[in-house]
C-alpha cells in the first residue's frame, strides 16, 4: 500500500520526524539522503521525501501492512 502527501516541510525534516516516530516501534534498516526504511515483526514501512516544484516536498509512505 502506498500513501502520498505534499507538505511545506523540507525533505530532511520529514525524514528526521519519520525516524522519531517509527524508530521507537521498528528497527531502522536503510538510511539514504531521501529515504528511510524501518522493519519489525509487524512488517515494514518505507518513507521517501523528495523536493517538488515550488515549495513542496512529496512524501511517499509504503507499507506491506495496510491498516484500517
Image (cartoon, helix red, strand yellow):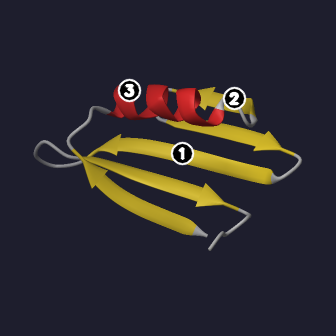
Quadrant position of the N terminus in the picture: bottom right
Q: Mark 3 and mark 1 in contact? Answer it, CB < 8 Å.
A: no
Q: CA distance from mark 2 to mark 3?
A: 19 Å
Q: Residue at 73% x, 63% y: name it.
A: 64
Q: Most extreme residue toward the bottom, as rendered?
A: 68
Q: Is residue 25 left or right of 21 when viewed as pictured?
A: right
Which of the two discs, 2 and 3, labels the residue nearer the N terminus? 3
Between 32 and 1, the residue placed more toward the observer is 1
Look at the numbered disc 1 and give the secondary structure of its residue: strand
Task: Please provide percent x and percent y for residue 37.
Answer: 66, 39
Task: Please provide percent x and percent y for residue 23.
Answer: 66, 29
Name the residue carrying label 3. Answer: 12
Q: Residue at 62% x, 74% y: name it.
A: 68
Q: Residue at 23% x, 48% y: name it.
A: 52
Name the residue carrying label 1. Answer: 47
Q: CA distance from mark 3 to mark 1?
A: 12 Å
Q: Which mark is residue 24?
A: 2
Task: Please provide percent x and percent y for residue 45.
Answer: 66, 50
Task: Please rate how many residues cluster around mark 3, counting C-alpha atoms within 10 Å: few if below 14, some from 14 to 19, many from 20.
Answer: some
Between 56 and 65, the residue placed more toward the observer is 65
Q: CA distance from mark 2 to mark 1?
A: 15 Å
Instruction: Select label 2 or label 1 by which is in front.
Output: 2
Look at the numbered disc 3 and give the secondary structure of its residue: helix
Task: Please rate how many residues cluster around mark 1, counting C-alpha atoms within 10 Å: few if below 14, some from 14 to 19, many from 20.
Answer: many
Q: Is residue 35 left or right of 51 when viewed as pictured?
A: right
Q: Is residue 23 left or right of 7 when viewed as pictured?
A: right
Task: Please provide percent x and percent y for residue 16.
Answer: 47, 25
Which of the two discs, 2 and 1, labels the residue nearer the N terminus? 2
Instruction: Select label 2 or label 3 by which is in front.
Output: 2
Report the label total: 3
Amino acid at each position: 500500500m502506498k500513501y502520498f502527501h505534499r507538505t511545506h516541510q523540507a525533505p530532511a525534516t520529514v525524514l528526521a520526524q519519520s525516524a522519531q516516530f517509527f524508530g521507537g516501534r521498528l528497527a531502522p534498516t536503510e538510511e539514504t539522503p531521501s529515504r528511510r526504511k524501518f522493519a519489525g515483526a509487524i512488517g515494514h514501512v518505507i518513507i521517501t521525501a523528495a523536493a517538488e516544484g515550488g515549495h513542496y516536498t512529496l512524501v511517499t509512505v509504503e507499507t506491506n501492512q495496510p491498516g484500517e
